[in-house]
Image (cartoon, grey):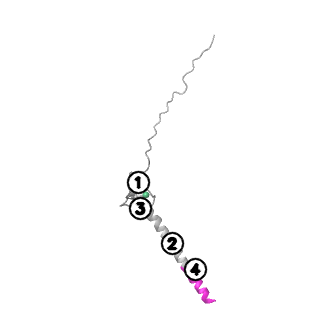
Amino acid sequence: MSANEPRGIVGGKTLNRTSPMLEGGETVVEKIGQHRHCRSCERAIPYKQEYCGEECETDWKGKMSSKKRQLTFFYILMVIIMIFAVSLTFLG
Ligand SMILES: [Zn+2]
């Protein structure tokens, strides 16, 4: 007697691939000559705008204000060093 067991079909799973079509991230604006780039993320945006959105605008302004503060601090430090150097020269 031969035990001829028919093998069941292995793995009945069918991979249902649902890959979303990735359209090129570039916007149409890129093709138009009159455009500029977002100050924050450098995406192509219409010429009239400075940022691609409000989020970028606030983000950029936040960055700028912190940068400005740093620059001011650096400037003050420079002035202090200058005054220090000048006073040293005068004192001896
Ligand atoms: Zn942006």
Magenta stretch encompasses residue 82 = yes
Q: Secondary structure at mark 3?
A: helix
Report the Cα–Cα distance between label 4 and label 1.
Answer: 48 Å
Eyeballing the image, is 19 above or below 27? above
Image marks 3 and 2: residues in contact by CB distance under 8 Å:
no
Report the Cα–Cα distance between label 2 and label 4.
Answer: 15 Å
Mark 3 Cβ and ligand 1 under 8 Å apart: no
The residue at 56%/81% (across/down) is 82
Given this view, does label 1 or label 3 mark the residue nearer the observer?
A: 1
Question: How many neighbours does mark 2 have within 10 angstroms: few (below 14), some (14-19), or many (20 or more)?
Answer: few
**Amino acid at circle 1:** Glu
Where residue 71 is drawn, which disc sits there?
2
Q: Which residue is mark 1?
A: 30
Ligand 1 - quadrant of the structure image: bottom left
N-terminal label among 2 and 4 = 2
N-terminal label among 1 and 2 = 1
Magenta stretch encompasses residue 90 = yes
Could you say where residue 11 lies in the image, as x and y percent from the top left?
54, 27
In the image, the segment drawn in magenta is: 79-92
Residue 91 picture quarter: bottom right
Q: Is residue 9 left or right of residue 49?
A: right
**Amino acid at circle 3:** Glu
Question: How many neighbours does mark 4 have within 10 angstroms: few (below 14), some (14-19), or many (20 or more)?
Answer: few
